[in-house]
Amino acid sequence: MRDLILATMADQPDIEIVAEIENESEIPRIVEETLPEFLVLAADSRSERPALCDSLLRIHPEMKILALATDGNWSVFYQASLEIQATAVEASEAGILDALRSISRAMKGKE
């Protein structure tokens, strides 16, 4: 599969391969060094996101990841998205303080 991917991308003038990695444990370090727009990696299961996706997208939410099957004819595209929410807040001292405190509690719960 690696040879097919490399051959396909080699003919594309708008795509540059910045690294080719044999050992999956090297991916985080190489991503830090090269800051690619896209990462193509092998995936074992369509129903489970590769463990690397979460950690890499948390650190580099602008990056996109294309996971290609190691044993089938499928692929999955992963990307991070920012969800912006709005909540009405009472326009009073108590309302503002309550909103700030509840946001603070929610953020601490995610850590």
Image: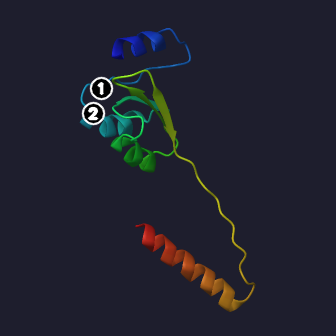
Is 48 in front, or is 24? 48
Looking at the rendered structure, the kind of residue marked 1 is: Ile
In the picture, measured across the screen, residue 69 lies left or right of residue 29, that is right
Q: Quadrant of the N terminus?
A: top left
Q: Report crowding for label 1: few under 14, some 14 to 19, many 20 or more residues within 10 A (C-alpha).
A: few
List x then y, in percent, for residue 9: 47, 14
List x then y, in percent, for residue 24: 27, 33
Residue 24 shows which numbered tag? 2
104 above or below 111?
below
71 above or below 100?
above
Q: Which residue is mark 1?
A: 21
Asked if disc 2 and disc 1 are in contact, CB closer than 8 Å, the reply is yes
Q: Residue at x 55, y 82 (%)?
A: 101
In the picture, measured across the screen, residue 12 lies left or right of residue 26, that is right
Q: How is the image coloured?
A: rainbow
Is 11 in front, or is 71? 71
Marks 2 and 1 sit apart, C-alpha to C-alpha, by 7 Å
List x then y, in percent, for residue 99: 62, 80
Camera-nearest label, 2 or 1: 2
Q: Quadrant of the C terminus?
A: bottom left
Residue 47 shows which numbered tag? none
Q: Residue at x 44, y 50 (%)?
A: 58
